[in-house]
Amino acid sequence: MQGSVARQGRLSPMERKLRVAGGQLGPIQRADSREQVVDRLLALLTEAADLGCELIVFPELALTTFFPRWHVPDLAEFDHFYETEMPNAVTQPLFDEARRRGIGFSLGYALIERADDGTVHRWNVQTLVDTTGEIVATFKKVHIPGHDTFDPERPFQHAERYFFEPSPDGFGVWDAFGARVGMMICNDRRWPETYREMGLQGVELILCGYNTPIHYVPDPSQDELQGFHNKLVMQSGAYQNGTFVVGVAKGGVEEGVASLCESIIVAPSGQILAEATTDGDEVIWADLRLDWCKQYTGTLFDMDYYRRPEVYTRLTTMRGPNG
Ligand code: CDT
């Protein structure tokens, strides 16, 4: 069904339509340079532009290997994995080509910010760039998974909580590409609050990059369910909030760790419009009839009419069952 509008019904000329792509990446090994990776991103962007797409979504941490799989005693040893500005010399060709071809993109990467008072912030971010090559917004990951100290029991680490601060900003929504666009990064997609926060701001399109190791060390019974859970959360989040979701992987075997691919584009009905079939670099795409969102947010999920915030007070006053 890739690229199909069959499930959306017929498009009338008056309807808002957006042709969107997911630019799935295969693995990025530690020895791969950023220049090599940007060449791969440019190839995906070019393919999407040739297909007539106006936007391509790239994965989380799309410029480097997924470095939180290692732990180093001094955090600063890994500062070379972070960008200090965007665009920069290595990524500028991506911005230039986007402007030349008239295609926007979202790109995940690690960002280090040094404040004037000497404070250092390390973020896991995703930047949205419009069809003129201008930055619309940079989103910081909210839900940081994994652990913050070295775990000798693990065959590989998932030390994101060591390498990244959680966003203090939460989930924003921006007017771009003729739509209300929001972003989330990897683990954010598993939390219903993520989608609802954006749903309450009228989101129509959520962009998500991810790196999901297939082996989940704390509970390996989840390994064989990774693909199912990936679809479960994005399809239900899309349906329950009447929004499109584009979820894009960096997958395959990276530094010996197998990660999920299965990038998807989901409709407000919860149906999958396009899905990756490889575990390498691949473009998926679909035509989004943006007013399809209203068929859900204006009926069954008319939030203004049906929601009961007065009885949902635990949602913002409690973190979990223990308070
Ligand atoms: N990158 C990322 O957020 N990955 C997580 C792995 C969770 S297990 C530590 C995910 O939710 O896919």
Image: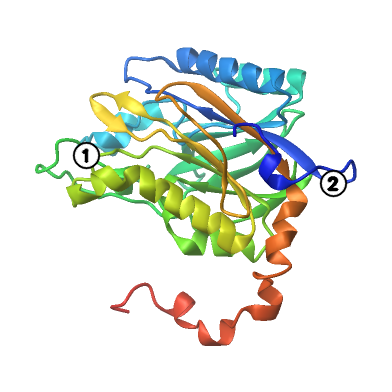
Left or right of residue 25: residue 10: right
Say which mark, if any, is on residue 226.
none
Left or right of residue 312: residue 260: left
Give residue 168's position: percent from left, percent from top: 49, 58
**Which residue was labeled with disc 1?**
157
Q: Amino acid at mark 1?
A: Gln
Q: Residues within 10 Å of mark 1 (few under 14, many from 20)?
A: many
Residue visible at 90% across and 45% down? 14
Say which mark, if any, is on residue 15.
2
Decide which of 70, 83 is in the foreground and name it.
70
Give residue 29's position: percent from left, percent from top: 33, 19
Q: Amino acid at mark 2?
A: Glu
Label 2: which secondary element: loop
Give residue 150's position: percent from left, percent from top: 17, 43
* Relative height, residue 200 to residue 43 (above, below): below
Q: Quadrant of the N terminus?
A: top right
Residue 294 image-quadrant placement: bottom right
How far is mark 2 from mark 1, CA to CA?
47 Å
The reply to whether the residue tagged 2 has its Cβ within 8 angstroms of ligand 1 is: no
Residue visible at 23% across and 40% down? 215
Q: Nearer the viewer, mark 2 or mark 1?
A: 2
Q: Quadrant of the C terminus?
A: bottom left
The reply to whether the residue tagged 1 has its Cβ within 8 angstroms of ligand 1 is: no
* Relative height, residue 228 to residue 131 (above, below): below
Most distant residue in the bottom direction: 310
Residue visible at 46% across and 36% down? 60
Q: Residues within 10 Å of mark 2 (few under 14, many from 20)?
A: few
| Quarter holding ligand 1 | top left
* Relative height, residue 132 to residue 317 (above, below): above
Whether residue 188 is visible here, answered yes or no, is: no
Give residue 321's position: percent from left, percent from top: 31, 77
Residue visible at 81% across and 45% down? 16
